Amino acid sequence: MKITITGIKADIGSIGGHICPSKALLDEVRQIVQQAQKKGDIIDFRISHTGDDIAILATHTLGVDSEKIHRLAHEAFLAGTEVAKSQGLYGAGQDLLVDAFSGNIKGMGPAVAEMEIEERPSEAFLFFAADKTDPGAYSFFLYKAFASSCPGTFLGPSLFQGFKFTIMDVSYTEGDKVVELNSPEDLYDIQALLRDEGRFVVESIHSRTTQEIVVAVSTTRLHNIAGKYVGKDDPIMVVRTQKDFPATGEVLQPFAICPYVAGFMRGSHVGPLTPVPQNSTISYFDGPPIVSCAAYSVKEGKFTGPADTFADGAEFWQHIRRKAAQKAEWLREQEFFGVAMLPESELEYGGIVEKLEELEKKFKIRS
Ligand code: F6R
Ligand code: MG
Ligand code: MG
């Protein structure tokens, strides 16, 4: 059976700053999506939050970029925004940058990751949602899991041919500017692009054995839509796993690295991307950057799950979170200095530009 898995997420208001949405807000979004399920527009859905972002995950048969599904998400976020306003939540409607819906929610603010698939007999996939970071943050993990640190690429014959990476230059705003590169032979070219987290973003990955889509990442840059800082892009990602694709554990393994990524406080600092359970709140320095991962099985579009991968009983990820906290403290010790903050081009508040202009006038050139 052909189904579409659609993830759409937005920050439409949160409690006490940028911490988490309210229960009433989540309930409102859930209620609207539930009505669509009753009407038969969608097969199944889940509502979750990661930090201040609400994600709608749904299955349907309408394909990617479906006007009906995108309109549904837009209406759910608009209704949620009204609840957020009525409760005085912070940043109500923050990610809804464009008022009039014109057929596709992409480019309006919310992040979208979706794929149409021929459902396998045992379809397994992971739904990632991150807060206080950029879409480029996922690139490192995808590089590791699909190209450089995946035992399946030498142990699993159906992975031997490697994967095709579609990489987008998100600094180009006239349209989608993409390049297709293959692992393993283009590994160095892939690295050359992905090192620039703010500009080159893995948009999708396909199997070179079966040609199937395996990964879809949201590539929204709110900054490009609004022309100024209006919040971080807080990306989502769908990753199919097992059999002809990397195993769930191979995809999760690199998240234990907790690499430093863009996005901490005011979207202008660097912090370790910390794996957390779903529905976690934000804590330290408006961060740290966090990522959650929900594992699902799906049959004829119906979900079983989620299994919350970073909320394990073995306490492995708790151990990793302590490492991430340590990394956060280490970098925070140097406050504004050097690599602790993003380069000027990526600082999310315009204030620094004004400040530097004022200071420029005070400089004197010695004779
Ligand atoms: C929000 C974020 C926060 C805010 C900060 C200031 O995603 O990262 O660090 O940037 O709380 O928010 P404003 O400028 O709205 O007071
Ligand atoms: Mg926010
Ligand atoms: Mg957010």
Image (tube, helix red, strand yellow):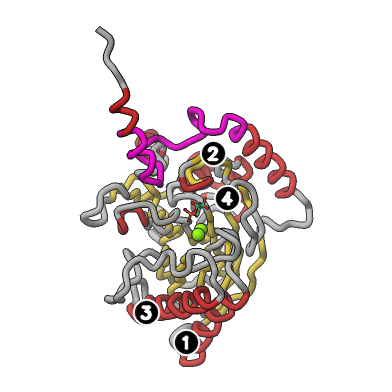
Cβ atoms under marks 1 and 4 closer than 8 Å:
no
What whole-number distance in Å separates the C-alpha atoms at marks 3 and 1?
A: 11 Å
**Residue nearer the viewer, 9 or 229:** 229
Label 2 amino acid? Tyr
The answer to whether residue 130 of the structure is visible from this angle is: yes
Query: Label 3 sits on what residue type?
Result: Arg
Q: Name the residue carrying label 3.
A: 71
Considering every residue shown, the one lying at the far front of the view is 362
**Residue in front for this viewpoint, 357 or 220:** 357
Q: Residues within 10 Å of mark 4 (few under 14, many from 20)?
A: some
Q: Amino acid at mark 1?
A: Ala
In this picture, is 74 found above or below 307? below
Instruction: Report how far apart the C-alphas of labels 4 and 3 lie in the structure.
Output: 31 Å
Marking on residue 260: 2
* Magenta region: 331-357
Which circle's residue, 1 or 4, is located before the other in the chain?
1
Q: Reading the chain from its start, which is encountered first: label 2 or label 4? A: 2
Task: Estimate the x, y position of residue 119 in percent, counting from the top left.
Answer: 48, 72
Question: Residue at label 1?
Answer: 36
Q: Is residue 14 above or below residue 38?
A: above
Q: What residue would you read off at disc 4? A: 286
Structural distance between the alpha carbons of marks 1 and 4: 35 Å
Cα gap from disc 2 to disc 3, whole angstroms: 35 Å
Q: Are marks 2 and 3 in contact (CB under 8 Å)?
A: no
Q: Is residue 149 magenta?
A: no
* First in sequence: mark 4 vs mark 3: 3
Q: In the picture, residue 327 is in which quadrant?
A: top right
Label 2, label 4: how far apart the Cα atoms are? 15 Å
Q: Position of residue 289 (x, y in %)?
A: 56, 49
Q: Earlier in the sequence, mark 2 or mark 3?
A: 3
